[in-house]
Amino acid sequence: MKLLFLGTGTSTGVPVIGCTCPTCTSPDPCDTRLRASALIKYDDGINVLIDCGPDFRQQILRAGSPPLEALVITHSHYDHVGGIDDLRPYCKDSRHFPTYCKADVAADLRSRNPWSFARKLYPGVPTFAIHTIGPMQPFDIAGHTLIPLPVMHAALPIVGFMTEGLAYITDCKTMPTKTMAAITGIDTLVINALRHEEHLSHLNLSRTLDIIDKIRPRIAYLTHMSHDIGPEATVRLPHNVRFAHDGLEIEIKEQP
């Protein structure tokens, strides 16, 4: 199995509009980050999209417009769902695009995108087959099991996902003990690290590294970073921790 990082930035992306800080003006392409999203690429050709933010069209074109089996959503903040209208090419021939999310996220999608859920649909609008998921309740997509991992985004309960040696967690501020236990010793951990300073609703780098040290993955990748993290080349990380960057594709070692 592989994971393709479509975007590794926070809600503003990097560079930030109008900013001239060293990160935003860096010539290193690794410091240019679209909003956070990723593509799980199973070995049998099944592709599952994690989140669909406002940069989705640009991201999926850059990835070669692969077929998509389904969308799984961590939470309904705009930088994670703002691009779902661009899924319309995947809804051809009256296909309702399979979408897996918590009940609160489903309600938000119906409220923000009423044209996709109307009784009388305008021709060409994207439509979705919503499947409600719950924390720690496994579900199946085309023969592959995913487990929603509960985490807290400040006071908002959201989920990450675990599947076949991978744990993908973003927008976490605190991680429940049961989530920590479920992913301890996992092969590959993807987790957010917004910046160096503390933040109300996101882990900072120091706290993220503490969590990685407790989980003990074979390797960890950092995502959902702001320009305040600094240019990638200037930040030292432990030997088993790396920055993810847009377009990076990694191999996941499935555990027995």
Image (cartoon, helix red, strand yellow):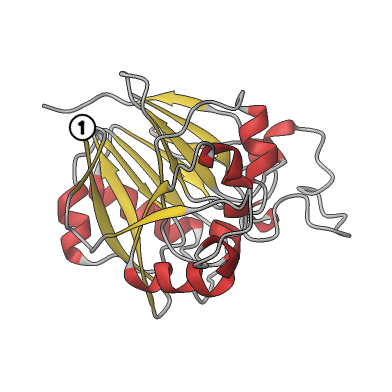
> Could you say which is closer to the camera, residue 228 or residue 113?
113
Left or right of residue 19, residue 197 in this image: left
Left or right of residue 251, residue 148 in this image: left
Q: Residue at x 56, y 49 (%)?
A: 36
> Could you say which is closer to the camera, residue 226 or residue 61?
61
Furthest-front residue in view? 120
Q: Is 211 situated above or below 6?
A: below
> Could you say which is closer to the camera, residue 80 or residue 67?
67
Q: Position of residue 232 (x, y in %)?
A: 64, 40
Category of crowding for the residue at label 1, using alpha-carbon neighbours closer than 10 angstroms: few (below 14), some (14–19), many (at least 20): few
Q: Residue at x 56, y 51 (%)?
A: 126
Q: Looking at the picture, which amino acid does disc 1 mark?
A: Gly
Q: Residue at x 49, y 67 (%)?
A: 119
Q: Position of residue 175 (x, y in %)?
A: 30, 65
Secondary structure of the residue carrying numbered label 1: loop
Asked whether residue 225 is in view, the answer is: no
Left or right of residue 157, residue 20 in this image: right
Q: Residue at x 67, y 58 (%)?
A: 228
Furthest-bottom residue in view? 155
Q: Position of residue 131 (x, y in %)?
A: 31, 57
| Quadrant hosting residue 49 | top left
Furthest-top residue in view? 44
Left or right of residue 1, residue 191 in this image: right
Q: Quadrant of the N terminus?
A: top left
Q: Which residue lies under the disc numbered 1?
A: 143
Asked whether residue 219 is in view, the answer is: yes
Q: Quadrant of the C terminus?
A: top left
The number of callouts visible is: 1
